[in-house]
């Protein structure tokens, strides 16, 4: 499992792994907590490589969304297709988090 995090201006981009599951969430927990507590930028989750997402990953996204919006910061999701996009639409996450087809940076 690998991920990459890049910061450009006011957006912190997290490139997620192809399997965004409980194992990936555990490995990303420290980064997500740091983003919610220590950064001042908005966050963009790059789903372009994600082919599978499970409930623990949905929970991690919601965790980050709640913490960021409480600080008047934004979170967006880019590049989601297939099962990840379908699950987020089914759970109506797309109604509260902006879904974009491509990265902003």
Image (cartoon, rainbow, N blue to C red):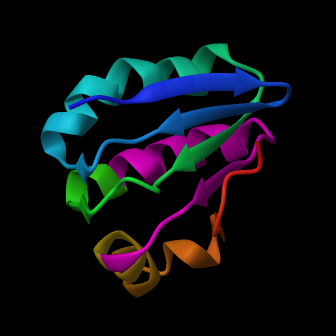
Q: Is residue 93 magenta?
A: no
Q: Is residue 6 left or right of residue 70?
A: left
The residue depicted at 38 percent of the width and 53 percent of the height is 49
* Residue 70 sits inside the magenta stretch: yes
Residue 32 in view in this figure: no
Q: Is residue 10 visible?
A: yes
On the image, the x and y values in percent for residue 56 come to 23, 51
Between 77 and 48, the one lying in front of the other is 48
- Residue 98 image position (x, y, % from top left): 68, 66
Q: Is residue 90 above or below residue 96?
A: below
- Give above or below for 75 relative to 97: above
Image point (76%, 42%), residue name? 105
On screen, residue 54 versus residue 33, left or right, reads left
Residue ID at (52%, 35%): 14
The image quadrant that residue 102 belongs to is bottom right
Asked if residue 49 lies left or right of residue 6, the reply is left
Q: Quadrant of the N terminus?
A: top left
Q: Note whether 73 is above or below 103 in the view shown.
A: above
Q: Where does the magenta region start and end? A: 59-82
Q: x%, y% of residue 84?
A: 35, 69
Q: Closest to the observer: 22 or 13?
A: 13
Residue 31 as seen in the image, left or right of residue 101: left
Judging depth in this view, the residue of 87 and 52 nearest the camera is 52
In the rendered image, residue 87, in percent from the top left (x then y), is placed at 34, 77
Q: Quadrant of residue 10?
A: top right
**Across the whole image, how many numbered discs are drawn on residues?**
0
């Amino acid at each position: 499992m690998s991920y990459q995090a890049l910061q450009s201006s006011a957006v912190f981009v997290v490139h997620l792994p192809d399997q965004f599951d409980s194992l990936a969430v555990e490995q990303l927990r420290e980064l997500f907590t740091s983003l919610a507590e220590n950064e001042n930028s908005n966050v963009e989750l790059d789903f372009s490589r994600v082919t599978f997402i499970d409930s623990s990953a949905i929970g991690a996204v919601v965790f980050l969304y709640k913490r960021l919006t409480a600080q008047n910061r934004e979170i967006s999701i880019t590049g989601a297709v297939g099962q990840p996009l379908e699950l987020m639409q089914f759970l109506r996450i797309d109604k509260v988090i902006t879904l974009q087809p491509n990265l902003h940076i």
